[in-house]
Amino acid sequence: MSNHISKSLNKFLVISDTAMSEENNEVYAFGPVVKELEFLQFPDEITWIGFRKKKNESHIKVTDRRIKTILLNSAGGQSIFDKLNILCNYPKYFFIILKEITEADKIHVRAPSNPAVIAMILSYFFPLKQFCFKYAGVWVGEASLFYKFQRSLLTRLGNNSKITINGTWPNQPKNVYGFENPCLDTSDRALGGVICESKHLTEKINYCFVGGMNTNKGVKKIIETLETLETDKLGTFHFVGGGPLLEQIIMRARKINHKTIFHGFLPKNQVLEIYKTCHFIILPSKSEGFPKVIGEAMNYGCVPLISKISCIDQYIHHKQNGFLIHPINQKTITNILEASLCITNTTYRNMIKENYLLAKKFTYGYYEHQLVTKIYKS
């Protein structure tokens, strides 16, 4: 794949607000992004700017020798003081990012974020450098004021900047491309193929939720549904992830008749073990781009039950390869769960076969091919 790239493309700069931490002179960072960068073949050197934060279970060690990390002091929060602290840090962020842009050949910026705003401004002053802004938020529809501001800025960038987003939309500017979020390697695809080939509905149907335990991800609505759901076909409901609602959800789950297991944060290899045993994954989020966990789960034969938001319905078609939750409330979630419990094994098998083929778009190889043919052309 690197043959498509000119030899001048050797210094790759990644500007992000991704969480990073240091321990015993080693750098750890958010696992999915670490994997994504390590699988890129074309850069000779990668400089990665992120935010210094407390290490958690989602962090893995950065081992690729091509990657040099720069940890910015984290700033942010809900109070007025927190907001002012962000502005106070902007000059420091600005000069660090400016220095690294001058030394890079190609620049990859992860938005929406505060470092992304700085990179957008600086892109005007480096017209010969190629910028790619990966916008992970919802591109069309409601968003916070800060996110709307960044969407507006992105549409006004120069010809040296390209934007990748979730999904494809009407009247999309020529420099805006629909991109899938990579999360699968060749071993995932091989193992997923074996799992999907042997997977069938059983007497008891297993479900999982993988994500943050917060109001946006809808985990509370799942518990509310399970509290009133009357069925003897539900097997085990697995919850993977942590967050502010975790303890509250665990307490409520103790009173539920259905079997629930809370795993907390898990490394990817352990999450895959849960996908193998589950038939469905549910994610009733209020807002999403396209979550990587859906691509992973589909690769391992988990049929998605997911909110009809953002670009989700461009991939998941109701009752064809999954179930769309709309509107997002307890009644709808109950109806969707009951519908999924009633499908035939033949229908289920057809769904997972279609989804396994679709999951090819979420491989690292497909992602890099898109980058070198559409974004960082010679």
Image: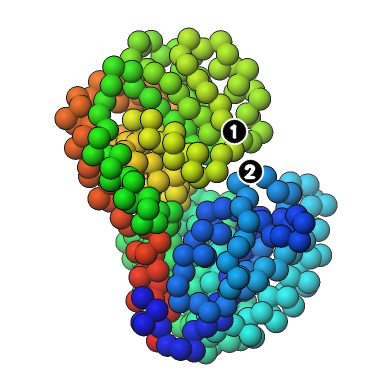
Residue 36 at x, y percent in the picture: 49, 61
SS for dot 2: loop
Q: In the image, is residue 197 above or below residue 105?
A: above
Q: Which residue is mark 1?
A: 264
Q: Residues within 10 Å of mark 1 (few under 14, many from 20)?
A: some
**Above/below status of 93 relative to 296:** below
**Residue beneath disc 2:** 57
Residues tagged 2 and 1 counted as in contact (Cβ below 8 A): yes
Q: Position of residue 281 (x, y in %)?
A: 40, 34
Residue shown at 69% from the left, 60% from the top: 27
Q: Is residue 216 left or right of residue 341?
A: right
Q: Residue at x 49, y 49 (%)?
A: 142
List x then y, in percent, for residue 235: 39, 18
Q: Tell me the amino acid under the disc marked 1.
A: Gly
Dot placed on the residue nearer the N-terminal end, 2 or 1 = 2
Q: For the residues marked 2 and 1, what is the alpha-carbon distance in whole angstroms?
A: 9 Å
